[in-house]
Image (cartoon, helix red, strand yellow):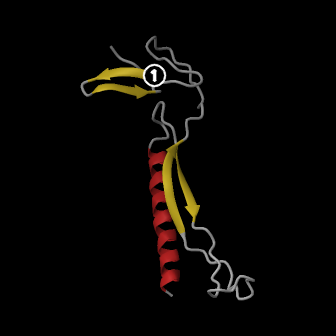
Amino acid sequence: MIRGLYTVGTGMLTQRKKLDVLANNLANVDTAGFKQDKLLTRSFQDVLIRRIGDSAGKNEVGPYNYGLHTDAVATDFIQGPLDQTDRMLDLAIEGEGFFAVNTEDGIRYTRAGAFRV
C-alpha cells in the first residue's frame, strides 16, 4: 500500500513539474531567442521480488514500478525560424553560438538579437 502511494506521489510530482515547464514554454513563446525546455524523467528499475536463497527464480512475484523521478529540465537548443526585420541592429545567429552581452552583472549570453544603442 505504501509503495503504491509512493508511486502515485512521484507521478503527481512529475506531472506538476511537467506543467511548470509547459507553462514557462507557453509564456515565452513570443520571446525573441527563447529556447524551449524539456522535462527529462526516468523510471526506477523494475525490481523482481524473490524469496531469499531461491536462485532458480521459481517464486518471482513479478516486476514492480516504483514511480518516476525528474532527472533534469533541459533546454532544447534546436535552431528556430529566422524572421527578417527592417532594423539595422537586429541580428541573428544561424547554427550554434550565442551573443556575449556586457551587463551590470557581467557578461551574459543570449540568442536574442534585437539590440539597442
Relative to 73, say whether 6 is above or below. Answer: below
Q: What residue is shown at x 46% (from left), y 11% (from top)?
A: 88
Q: Quadrant of the C terminus?
A: top left
Residue type at mark 1 is Gly
Seen at 47% across and 30% down, the residue is 32
Q: Position of residue 67 (x, y in %)?
A: 55, 71
Tell which of 76 and 48 is nearer to you. Answer: 48
Q: Residue at x 41, y 27 (%)?
A: 109
| Relative vertical location of residue 19 with respect to residue 52 in this rendering, above or below | above
| Position of residue 38 measured from the top left corner of the image (x, y, whole percent) | 54, 49
Q: Is residue 76 above or below residue 62?
A: above
Tag count = 1
- The extreme left residue here reads 104
- Within 10 Å of disc 1 (Cα), the crowding (few <14, some 14-19, many 20+) is some
| Secondary element at tag 1 | loop
**Could you say where residue 87 lies in the image, as x and y percent from the top left?**
46, 14
- Place residue 44 in its image quadrant: bottom right
Q: Position of residue 98 (x, y in %)?
A: 47, 24
Q: Residue at x 62, y 86 (%)?
A: 52
Query: Foreground residue, 87 or 10?
Result: 10
- Kindly identify which residue carries mark 1: 113
- Comparing 101 with 29, the one in front is 101
